[in-house]
Amino acid sequence: MELVREQKDDMSYAFSELYDRHSVNARNFIHYMIQSGEQTEDIFQETFITFYRRVCEGKEIKNIKAYLLSIARNLCLKYYRDKKTTVPFEPEQFFVDERNKYESNELFSLIVKSLPLLEEKQREAFVLREFEGLPYDEIAKVCQTSLSNAKSRVFRAHKKLIEILQPYLKDLAD
C-alpha cells in the first residue's frame, strides 16, 4: 500500500500484487450482484480505479478486501439506482465435491438461479457470506449495517432460499 501511495518505482508491481490477491473476490461479488457479464466488467474496472485513486489520495485502509468489496457494493447499488432492470444470469464454474457432483451442480445452479428472487440486501449478505466466505463482522462493515443485522440478512436469505427451493429439494432427496 505504501509503495502505491508514494508513487515509487515499484508502484506498478505493488498494485499488481494487490490486484492479483483481491480481484477474484471483487469480480465474483459484482458478478453475483449484477448478473451481467458486460456490466460486471465495467463495475469491476471502476472498483479498482476508485481503489487506486483513494490509495493515492492517502486513504488509510486497514482491511483491503473489505474496502474493495465496499467500493464494489456502492457501485452495484449505484448501478441498480441508475438502471432499474435485471439481466439474465450467467453462472460461473466453481469447485464441486466429486462424490455428489451431479446433485451439487444441480443444487448450486438452483441456488444461483434463485438469487434474483431475494431482496437486494439479503442477496448481498448471502453472496458475501456463502460465496465470498466473509465473516459476519466484515459483512456488517461492507453492508454498512450492524453485526446483528448482517446475521439476520443472511439468515433470512437462507430461509427464503429454502422456501423457494423446497419443491426441488424434495426431488433431489428422492
Image (cartoon, rainbow, N blue to C red):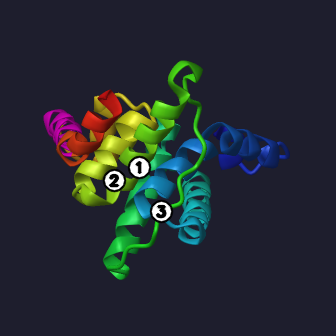
Kindly identify the amino acid type of the residue bearing the numbered disc 2. Answer: Leu
Q: Is residue 108 left or right of residue 96?
A: left
- The answer to whether the residues at label 2 and label 1 have Cβ atoms under 8 Å apart is yes
Q: Position of residue 63 (x, y in %)?
A: 47, 35
Q: Which residue is mark 1?
A: 112
- The answer to whether the residues at label 2 and label 3 have Cβ atoms under 8 Å apart is yes
Q: Is residue 60 left or right of residue 46?
A: left
Does the magenta segment cover residue 33? no
Q: What's the CA distance linking mark 3 and mark 1?
A: 8 Å
Q: Say which residue appears at 57% left-offset and 60% top-offset.
A: 44
In what element is the residue under mark 3? Answer: loop
Q: Toward the viewer: 53 or 85?
A: 85
Q: In this picture, which residue range is highlighted in magenta?
A: 147-160
Indicate which disc, 2 or 3, sits on the residue closer to the N terminus. 3
Q: Which residue is mark 3?
A: 89
Q: Quadrant of the C terminus?
A: top left
Q: Is residue 22 left or right of residue 123?
A: right
- The answer to whether the residues at label 3 and label 1 have Cβ atoms under 8 Å apart is yes
- The disc placed on residue 134 is none
Q: Quadrant of the N terminus?
A: top right
Q: Up-down: is 78 above or below 156? A: below
Q: What's the CA distance linking mark 2 and mark 3?
A: 10 Å
Q: Up-down: is 148 above or below 31? A: above
Q: Is residue 69 left or right of residue 1?
A: left
Quadrant for residue 167, please give it.
Answer: top left
Furthest toward the top, the residue is 99
In what element is the residue under mark 2? Answer: helix
In what element is the residue under mark 1? Answer: helix
Q: Which residue is mark 2?
A: 115
Q: Position of residue 75 (x, y in %)?
A: 43, 65
